[in-house]
Image (cartoon, rainbow, N blue to C red):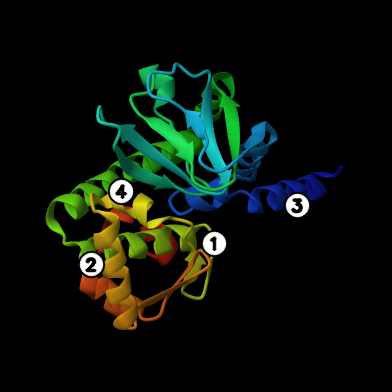
Amino acid sequence: MSQTNLEVAEGTLAAASPLVVKLESFATLAAADRAALADLGRYARDLGARRNVIREGDRPDHVHLILDGWAARYKLLPDGTRQITAFLIPGDFCDLHITILGHMDHSIATITRATVAYVPRAVMDALTDRPSVAKAFWWATLVDEAVLRAWVVNVGRRDAYESIGHLMCELYLRMHNVGLTTDHSYELPLTQEELGDALGLTPVHVNRSLQRMRADGLISLDRGALTIHDYRRLEKASGFNPNYLHFERRSGG
């Protein structure tokens, strides 16, 4: 294969990778870097819905990457209740930190049927030897921390209506950033219980807030798909500021 054809093949492979699309929100990656990241798909496994990917206390030999579907990061309390601390979408690593920390201090489970890459540590080590990839991984880790800070504010200071609207805006931008939205619609396969577990709300409070949002003409939910009818109004009503997602490069900042 000629060099030109090889670059075309690599570019086609990389274009199909949500991880590449996500990381290029921040970093300029060479064709070889994009191809190496896209090649992580060779480690893919298909998992059913609501299956544990990894449990608290496990010492994994792999880093897990969501290629398709949704997953959640969560902690179980002694009384059996659950706090969801992140929703994971295509292009998200579940546990990039595990190569340093050694064991899991939380659990990760699929929400929908999902395709997950189980990437060997040696492969991750080789990727981090690439300066641009290592910098992009560091950016992704810092954004994950920023998202968690935003969630703390949601749980601690916003009411149910505001916190649900804030989460909907965040998920819209994250999905849009990896090419998974159509106009202002995107897949939202979350139950009211799962929304409550993420936001510290009862299903009753979630239901009432969703009904109010529909009545206000902000959203509609139909068979697991969310449509935001007036994004700016929803952003304003929920006090949403997207600065913590750090998508400046893609938006021209």
- Residue that carries the numbered disc 2 in the rendered image: 161
Residue marked by disc 3: 8
Image mark count: 4
The amino acid at mark 3 is Val
Front-most of residues 69 and 120:
69
Estimate how packed mark 4 is, as few (under 14), some (14 to 19) or many (20 or more) residues with alpha carbons within 10 Å.
many
Mark 1 touches mark 3? (CB < 8 Å) = no
**15 in relation to 81, above or below:** below
- What amino acid is labelled 1 in the image? Leu
Of mark 4 and mark 3, the one earlier in the sequence is 3
Element carrying mark 3: helix
Mark 4 to mark 3 CA distance (whole Å): 42 Å
- Indicate which label's residue lies in the foreground, 1 or 3: 1
Q: Earlier in the sequence, mark 4 or mark 2?
A: 2
127 with respect to 83 (left or right): right
Q: Quadrant of the N terminus?
A: top right
Q: Nearer the viewer, mark 2 or mark 1?
A: 2
- The CA distance from mark 2 to mark 1 is 25 Å
Q: Label 1 belongs to which residue?
A: 180
Task: Answer whether residue 215 is visible to the viewer in this image.
Answer: yes
Give the label, 4 or 3, closer to the camera: 4
Q: Which residue is mark 4?
A: 198
Alpha carbon of mark 3 to alpha carbon of mark 2: how far? 47 Å
Camera-nearest residue between 41 and 233:
233
Between the residue at mark 4 and the residue at mark 2, the CA separation in whole angstroms equals: 14 Å
Distance from Cα at disc 1 to Cα at disc 3: 23 Å
Q: Are marks 4 and 3 in contact (CB under 8 Å)?
A: no
| Residue that appears at 23% across and 68% down | 238
